[in-house]
Amino acid sequence: MLVFQRYGPGFQLHRRLMQQPLTREGVTIFRPVQTQQCHVLLQNLLASPEDFAAHIRRFTSAVTLEMTYGHKVTADDDAYLHIADQVNVVSTKLSKCSVLELFPSGAFCKPGVNRC
């Protein structure tokens, strides 16, 4: 992950590769994917508005999967949608943890000391 990488030529290369598709010109290539999945979202909302949260999860996961990995989600029971939901649950749980819960050895570090 870029967050844990030391600053240097490798970091700069990865950052450049990650930022290029997110420029004003770069994001236009994703518009057809977003439009198509938006149509699916609206159809799902019309069919069952009570499942609003599930439809939004499907929309965001489907757009992300196609933009990132090129996998086109065509059905609600797509295996990759299920995996994306599981990853979302895990990342939500992790975001509620403190750094010391993730890296317990950090609890033994003295303030102001760079090394344990």
Image (cartoon, grey):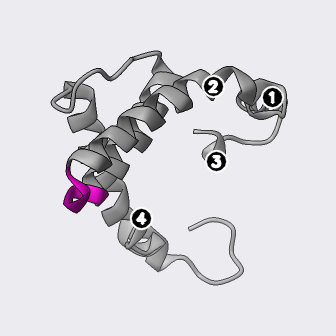
The local secondary structure at tag 4 comes to loop
Visible residue check, residue 2: yes
Residue 79 at what x, y percent from top left? 19, 26
Q: Judge depth for marks 1 and 3 and give the one in front.
A: 1
Q: Are the residues tagged 1 and 3 within 8 Å (C-beta)?
A: no
Q: Judge depth for marks 4 and 1 and give the one in front.
A: 1
Place residue 113 in its image quadrant. bottom right
**Badge 4 or badge 2: first in the primary sequence:** 2
Q: To which residue does mark 1 refer?
A: 16
Place residue 75 in its image quadrant. top left
Q: Judge depth for marks 4 and 2 and give the one in front.
A: 2
Q: In this view of the protein, which residue sits in the foreground, 99 or 16?
A: 16
**Badge 4 or badge 1: first in the primary sequence:** 1
Q: To which residue does mark 3 refer?
A: 3
Q: Judge depth for marks 2 and 1 and give the one in front.
A: 2
**Badge 1 or badge 3: first in the primary sequence:** 3
What separation in Å lies between label 1 and label 3 (alpha carbons)? 14 Å
Q: Are the residues tagged 4 and 1 within 8 Å (C-beta)?
A: no
Q: Judge depth for marks 4 and 3 and give the one in front.
A: 3
Vertical comparison of 46 with 39: above or below: below
Question: What residue do we see at 46% from left, 23% from top?
Answer: 66
Q: Is residue 44 magenta?
A: no
Task: Provide the residue span drawn in magenta.
Answer: 48-52
Q: To which residue does mark 4 refer?
A: 103
**Badge 3 amino acid:** Val
**Badge 3 or badge 2: first in the primary sequence:** 3
**Badge 2 amino acid:** Phe
**Badge 2 or badge 1: first in the primary sequence:** 1
The N terminus appears in which quarter of the rendering?
top right
